Image (cartoon, grey):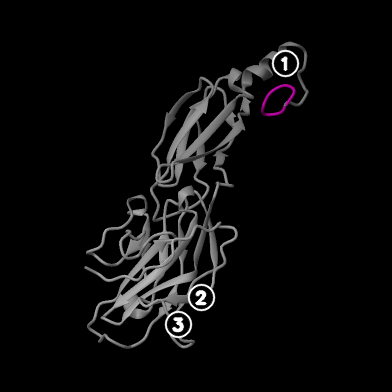
Amino acid sequence: SLRRGRHPRRKASFVQQRCTLSYVSLSGSLAHILGPQLTVPQSVAVQEGRCIFIPCRVSYPERGWSNSTPAWGYWFKKGAESSQDPPVATNDPHHEVLEETRERFHLLGDPETYNCSLRIRNAQKRDTGVYFFRVERGSYVLYNYIHNQLCVFVMAPTETPDIHIVGTLESGHPGNVTCAAPWPCEQGTPPTFSWIGANLTSALGPEAARTSVLTVTPRPQDHGTDLTCQVTFPGASVTVQRTVQLSVSCECWARTYRAQGGEGQGLGEAGPGV
Protein backbone atom coordinates (compact mmCIF):
# COMPACT_ATOMS: atom_id res chain seq x y z
CA SER A 1 0.00 0.00 0.00
CA LEU A 2 1.05 3.60 -0.52
CA ARG A 3 2.76 5.44 2.32
CA ARG A 4 1.31 8.80 3.15
CA GLY A 5 2.20 11.50 5.64
CA ARG A 6 -0.23 12.69 8.28
CA HIS A 7 -1.35 16.18 9.12
CA PRO A 8 -3.23 17.55 12.15
CA ARG A 9 -7.01 17.27 12.21
CA ARG A 10 -7.95 20.89 12.73
CA LYS A 11 -11.24 22.51 11.91
CA ALA A 12 -10.86 25.99 10.44
CA SER A 13 -13.36 28.55 9.32
CA PHE A 14 -13.22 28.96 5.56
CA VAL A 15 -13.33 32.72 5.92
CA GLN A 16 -10.54 32.75 8.51
CA GLN A 17 -8.39 30.12 6.83
CA ARG A 18 -5.00 31.55 6.00
CA CYS A 19 -3.28 30.12 2.96
CA THR A 20 0.51 29.86 3.01
CA LEU A 21 2.96 27.91 0.93
CA SER A 22 4.82 25.17 2.76
CA TYR A 23 4.73 21.43 3.17
CA VAL A 24 4.97 18.61 5.66
CA SER A 25 6.95 15.47 4.88
CA LEU A 26 6.62 12.07 6.52
CA SER A 27 8.83 13.24 9.37
CA GLY A 28 6.86 16.48 9.76
CA SER A 29 9.95 18.65 9.24
CA LEU A 30 9.65 22.03 7.56
CA ALA A 31 10.69 22.42 3.96
CA HIS A 32 14.01 23.90 3.06
CA ILE A 33 13.65 27.29 1.45
CA LEU A 34 14.60 25.77 -1.89
CA GLY A 35 12.62 22.60 -1.29
CA PRO A 36 9.18 21.54 -2.47
CA GLN A 37 6.75 24.34 -3.19
CA LEU A 38 3.21 24.65 -4.51
CA THR A 39 1.95 27.49 -6.68
CA VAL A 40 -1.85 27.70 -6.73
CA PRO A 41 -4.38 30.54 -6.44
CA GLN A 42 -4.96 31.46 -2.82
CA SER A 43 -8.72 31.33 -3.30
CA VAL A 44 -11.21 30.81 -6.11
CA ALA A 45 -14.97 31.32 -6.36
CA VAL A 46 -17.42 29.49 -8.60
CA GLN A 47 -21.19 29.49 -8.93
CA GLU A 48 -23.24 26.37 -8.25
CA GLY A 49 -23.53 24.19 -11.34
CA ARG A 50 -20.59 25.78 -13.08
CA CYS A 51 -17.13 24.50 -13.91
CA ILE A 52 -13.76 25.95 -12.98
CA PHE A 53 -10.17 25.23 -13.99
CA ILE A 54 -7.57 25.89 -11.30
CA PRO A 55 -3.94 26.14 -12.49
CA CYS A 56 -1.34 24.64 -10.19
CA ARG A 57 2.40 24.01 -10.29
CA VAL A 58 4.34 21.82 -7.89
CA SER A 59 8.06 21.30 -7.26
CA TYR A 60 9.87 18.47 -5.47
CA PRO A 61 13.47 17.20 -5.20
CA GLU A 62 15.12 15.12 -7.92
CA ARG A 63 15.94 12.42 -5.44
CA GLY A 64 14.88 8.80 -5.09
CA TRP A 65 13.34 8.55 -8.56
CA SER A 66 14.25 8.36 -12.24
CA ASN A 67 12.49 9.55 -15.38
CA SER A 68 10.68 6.22 -15.60
CA THR A 69 9.32 6.50 -12.04
CA PRO A 70 5.61 7.40 -12.05
CA ALA A 71 4.46 10.43 -10.07
CA TRP A 72 1.13 10.26 -8.26
CA GLY A 73 -0.79 13.35 -7.26
CA TYR A 74 -3.67 13.61 -4.79
CA TRP A 75 -6.00 16.46 -3.85
CA PHE A 76 -7.52 16.14 -0.37
CA LYS A 77 -10.09 18.23 1.45
CA LYS A 78 -8.76 19.76 4.65
CA GLY A 79 -9.53 17.49 7.60
CA ALA A 80 -8.72 14.32 5.69
CA GLU A 81 -5.93 11.98 6.76
CA SER A 82 -3.84 11.37 3.67
CA SER A 83 -2.73 8.02 5.11
CA GLN A 84 -6.24 6.58 5.14
CA ASP A 85 -8.93 8.89 3.74
CA PRO A 86 -9.80 9.00 0.03
CA PRO A 87 -8.77 12.07 -1.97
CA VAL A 88 -11.20 14.19 -3.98
CA ALA A 89 -9.09 13.66 -7.11
CA THR A 90 -6.01 11.69 -8.15
CA ASN A 91 -4.20 10.28 -11.17
CA ASP A 92 -3.42 7.09 -9.23
CA PRO A 93 -5.54 4.33 -10.86
CA HIS A 94 -5.16 2.12 -7.79
CA HIS A 95 -6.63 4.65 -5.39
CA GLU A 96 -10.34 5.23 -4.78
CA VAL A 97 -11.59 8.82 -4.67
CA LEU A 98 -14.22 10.40 -2.46
CA GLU A 99 -17.67 9.35 -3.68
CA GLU A 100 -19.17 12.86 -3.54
CA THR A 101 -16.48 14.26 -5.86
CA ARG A 102 -16.16 11.29 -8.20
CA GLU A 103 -16.59 12.30 -11.86
CA ARG A 104 -16.67 15.97 -10.83
CA PHE A 105 -13.13 16.67 -9.54
CA HIS A 106 -10.32 15.85 -11.97
CA LEU A 107 -6.56 16.13 -11.57
CA LEU A 108 -5.81 17.34 -15.09
CA GLY A 109 -2.15 18.10 -14.50
CA ASP A 110 0.59 15.49 -14.65
CA PRO A 111 2.77 15.52 -11.51
CA GLU A 112 5.62 14.05 -13.58
CA THR A 113 5.79 17.42 -15.35
CA TYR A 114 5.22 19.31 -12.07
CA ASN A 115 1.61 20.11 -12.96
CA CYS A 116 -1.11 19.74 -10.32
CA SER A 117 -3.93 21.63 -12.07
CA LEU A 118 -7.44 20.75 -10.95
CA ARG A 119 -10.82 20.98 -12.68
CA ILE A 120 -14.14 21.04 -10.84
CA ARG A 121 -17.37 20.60 -12.75
CA ASN A 122 -20.99 20.71 -11.57
CA ALA A 123 -19.83 22.66 -8.51
CA GLN A 124 -21.92 22.06 -5.39
CA LYS A 125 -22.30 24.05 -2.17
CA ARG A 126 -20.66 21.27 -0.17
CA ASP A 127 -17.50 21.69 -2.26
CA THR A 128 -16.78 24.91 -0.36
CA GLY A 129 -13.66 24.42 1.74
CA VAL A 130 -9.88 24.18 1.77
CA TYR A 131 -7.91 21.57 -0.18
CA PHE A 132 -4.31 20.42 -0.02
CA PHE A 133 -2.14 18.57 -2.53
CA ARG A 134 0.05 15.52 -2.03
CA VAL A 135 2.71 14.14 -4.37
CA GLU A 136 4.44 10.75 -4.33
CA ARG A 137 7.35 9.76 -6.56
CA GLY A 138 9.77 7.03 -5.65
CA SER A 139 10.83 6.33 -2.08
CA TYR A 140 11.81 9.87 -1.08
CA VAL A 141 9.24 12.25 -2.57
CA LEU A 142 6.27 11.74 -0.24
CA TYR A 143 4.98 15.22 0.55
CA ASN A 144 1.79 16.86 1.80
CA TYR A 145 1.58 20.56 0.93
CA ILE A 146 -0.69 21.50 3.79
CA HIS A 147 -0.66 25.29 4.24
CA ASN A 148 -2.33 27.82 1.98
CA GLN A 149 -3.54 25.05 -0.13
CA LEU A 150 -6.52 25.86 -2.30
CA CYS A 151 -9.51 27.74 -0.89
CA VAL A 152 -12.71 27.10 -2.86
CA PHE A 153 -15.95 29.00 -2.34
CA VAL A 154 -19.12 27.89 -4.14
CA MET A 155 -21.68 30.69 -4.47
CA ALA A 156 -25.39 30.64 -5.21
CA PRO A 157 -26.17 31.40 -8.87
CA THR A 158 -26.38 35.10 -9.68
CA GLU A 159 -27.31 34.77 -13.36
CA THR A 160 -30.66 33.86 -14.86
CA PRO A 161 -31.60 32.45 -18.27
CA ASP A 162 -32.00 34.70 -21.30
CA ILE A 163 -35.41 34.62 -23.01
CA HIS A 164 -35.60 35.85 -26.60
CA ILE A 165 -38.79 36.18 -28.64
CA VAL A 166 -38.26 36.21 -32.38
CA GLY A 167 -40.34 38.97 -33.96
CA THR A 168 -43.82 39.87 -32.73
CA LEU A 169 -46.19 37.31 -31.28
CA GLU A 170 -49.45 37.43 -33.22
CA SER A 171 -52.67 35.83 -32.08
CA GLY A 172 -53.36 32.60 -33.94
CA HIS A 173 -49.90 32.47 -35.51
CA PRO A 174 -47.02 30.31 -34.26
CA GLY A 175 -43.95 32.10 -32.94
CA ASN A 176 -40.67 30.96 -31.41
CA VAL A 177 -39.44 31.73 -27.90
CA THR A 178 -35.83 30.78 -27.09
CA CYS A 179 -34.41 30.22 -23.61
CA ALA A 180 -30.63 30.09 -23.20
CA ALA A 181 -28.80 28.72 -20.16
CA PRO A 182 -26.95 31.51 -18.32
CA TRP A 183 -23.46 30.05 -18.66
CA PRO A 184 -21.49 27.68 -20.86
CA CYS A 185 -19.81 24.75 -19.16
CA GLU A 186 -18.69 22.27 -21.76
CA GLN A 187 -17.50 19.70 -19.23
CA GLY A 188 -20.62 19.94 -17.06
CA THR A 189 -23.80 17.89 -17.18
CA PRO A 190 -26.15 19.51 -19.75
CA PRO A 191 -29.04 21.43 -18.19
CA THR A 192 -32.71 20.54 -18.52
CA PHE A 193 -35.36 23.08 -19.49
CA SER A 194 -38.99 23.48 -18.51
CA TRP A 195 -41.57 26.10 -19.46
CA ILE A 196 -44.37 27.39 -17.24
CA GLY A 197 -47.10 29.68 -18.52
CA ALA A 198 -50.73 30.25 -19.37
CA ASN A 199 -52.77 27.80 -21.40
CA LEU A 200 -50.80 28.40 -24.55
CA THR A 201 -50.93 26.12 -27.53
CA SER A 202 -47.26 25.24 -27.65
CA ALA A 203 -44.73 22.68 -28.78
CA LEU A 204 -41.12 22.13 -27.74
CA GLY A 205 -38.61 22.30 -30.55
CA PRO A 206 -35.26 20.49 -30.63
CA GLU A 207 -33.24 21.16 -27.49
CA ALA A 208 -29.59 22.04 -27.91
CA ALA A 209 -27.05 21.62 -25.13
CA ARG A 210 -27.56 25.16 -23.85
CA THR A 211 -30.85 26.37 -25.36
CA SER A 212 -34.51 25.39 -25.63
CA VAL A 213 -36.97 26.62 -28.27
CA LEU A 214 -40.69 26.82 -27.52
CA THR A 215 -43.15 27.34 -30.38
CA VAL A 216 -46.27 29.10 -29.13
CA THR A 217 -49.56 29.94 -30.83
CA PRO A 218 -50.95 32.65 -28.57
CA ARG A 219 -54.56 33.78 -28.16
CA PRO A 220 -55.74 37.34 -27.51
CA GLN A 221 -56.27 36.55 -23.82
CA ASP A 222 -52.61 35.50 -23.51
CA HIS A 223 -51.51 39.12 -23.84
CA GLY A 224 -49.88 40.25 -20.60
CA THR A 225 -49.62 36.75 -19.13
CA ASP A 226 -46.39 35.34 -17.69
CA LEU A 227 -44.13 32.83 -19.39
CA THR A 228 -41.34 31.30 -17.30
CA CYS A 229 -38.28 29.34 -18.39
CA GLN A 230 -36.66 27.16 -15.73
CA VAL A 231 -33.14 25.79 -16.18
CA THR A 232 -32.01 22.96 -13.93
CA PHE A 233 -28.42 21.77 -13.66
CA PRO A 234 -28.82 18.16 -12.50
CA GLY A 235 -25.15 17.74 -11.63
CA ALA A 236 -25.52 20.34 -8.87
CA SER A 237 -29.29 20.10 -8.21
CA VAL A 238 -29.69 23.84 -8.75
CA THR A 239 -32.46 25.63 -10.67
CA VAL A 240 -32.61 29.18 -12.00
CA GLN A 241 -35.45 30.84 -13.87
CA ARG A 242 -36.64 33.96 -15.66
CA THR A 243 -40.19 35.21 -16.30
CA VAL A 244 -41.37 37.53 -19.09
CA GLN A 245 -44.76 39.01 -19.89
CA LEU A 246 -46.11 38.13 -23.31
CA SER A 247 -46.99 40.90 -25.71
CA VAL A 248 -49.51 39.57 -28.20
CA SER A 249 -50.80 41.56 -31.17
CA CYS A 250 -54.24 40.81 -32.58
CA GLU A 251 -56.08 42.14 -35.64
CA CYS A 252 -59.34 41.64 -33.72
CA TRP A 253 -58.41 44.61 -31.52
CA ALA A 254 -58.05 46.80 -34.58
CA ARG A 255 -61.41 45.64 -35.95
CA THR A 256 -63.10 46.32 -32.62
CA TYR A 257 -61.48 49.74 -32.39
CA ARG A 258 -62.60 50.71 -35.90
CA ALA A 259 -66.13 49.49 -35.17
CA GLN A 260 -66.19 51.90 -32.23
CA GLY A 261 -65.31 54.84 -34.46
CA GLY A 262 -61.58 54.84 -33.97
CA GLU A 263 -60.54 54.63 -37.64
CA GLY A 264 -57.52 56.70 -38.50
CA GLN A 265 -56.08 56.46 -34.98
CA GLY A 266 -52.73 54.65 -34.48
CA LEU A 267 -52.54 51.43 -32.43
CA GLY A 268 -49.61 49.84 -30.69
CA GLU A 269 -48.73 46.34 -31.79
CA ALA A 270 -49.65 44.85 -28.43
CA GLY A 271 -53.23 46.14 -28.48
CA PRO A 272 -55.22 48.96 -26.94
CA GLY A 273 -53.72 50.74 -23.99
CA VAL A 274 -50.21 49.33 -24.48
Pointers 1 and 3 in contact (C-beta within 8 Å): no
Relative to 157, residue 193 above or below: above
Residue located 49% across and 45% down the image: 181
Residue 260 within the magenta-colored segment of the rendering: no
Q: Amino acid at mark 2?
A: Leu
Crowding near the residue tagged with mark 3, few <14, some 14–19, many ≥20 C-alpha atoms within 10 Å: some
Element assignment for label 3: loop
Residue 64, numbered circle: none
The residue identified by callout 2 is 21
- Coordinates of residue 111 in the picture (x, y in percent): 34, 75
The residue identified by callout 3 is 31
Q: Quadrant of residue 169?
A: top right
Residue 245 or 271: which is nearer the viewer? Answer: 245
Q: Looking at the image, is mark 1 or mark 3 earlier in the sequence?
A: 3
Relative to 155, residue 163 above or below: above
Q: Residue furthest top?
A: 260
Residue 220 or 125: which is nearer the viewer? Answer: 125
Q: Amino acid at mark 3?
A: Ala
Residue located 51% across and 19% down the image: 199
- Say which of marks 1 and 2 sits in front: 2
Q: Is residue 133 visible?
A: yes
Element assignment for label 2: loop
Spatial separation of the CA atoms under disc 1 and disc 2:
76 Å
Spatial separation of the CA atoms under disc 1 and disc 3:
85 Å
Crowding near the residue tagged with mark 1, few <14, some 14–19, many ≥20 C-alpha atoms within 10 Å: some
Q: The C terminus appears in which quarter of the rendering? A: top right
Q: Amino acid at mark 1?
A: Tyr
Residue located 41% across and 67% down the image: 7
Which portion, as a residue range, is magenta? 268-274
- Coordinates of residue 105 in the picture (x, y in percent): 38, 58
Question: Would you say 169 lies left or right of 95 here?
Answer: right
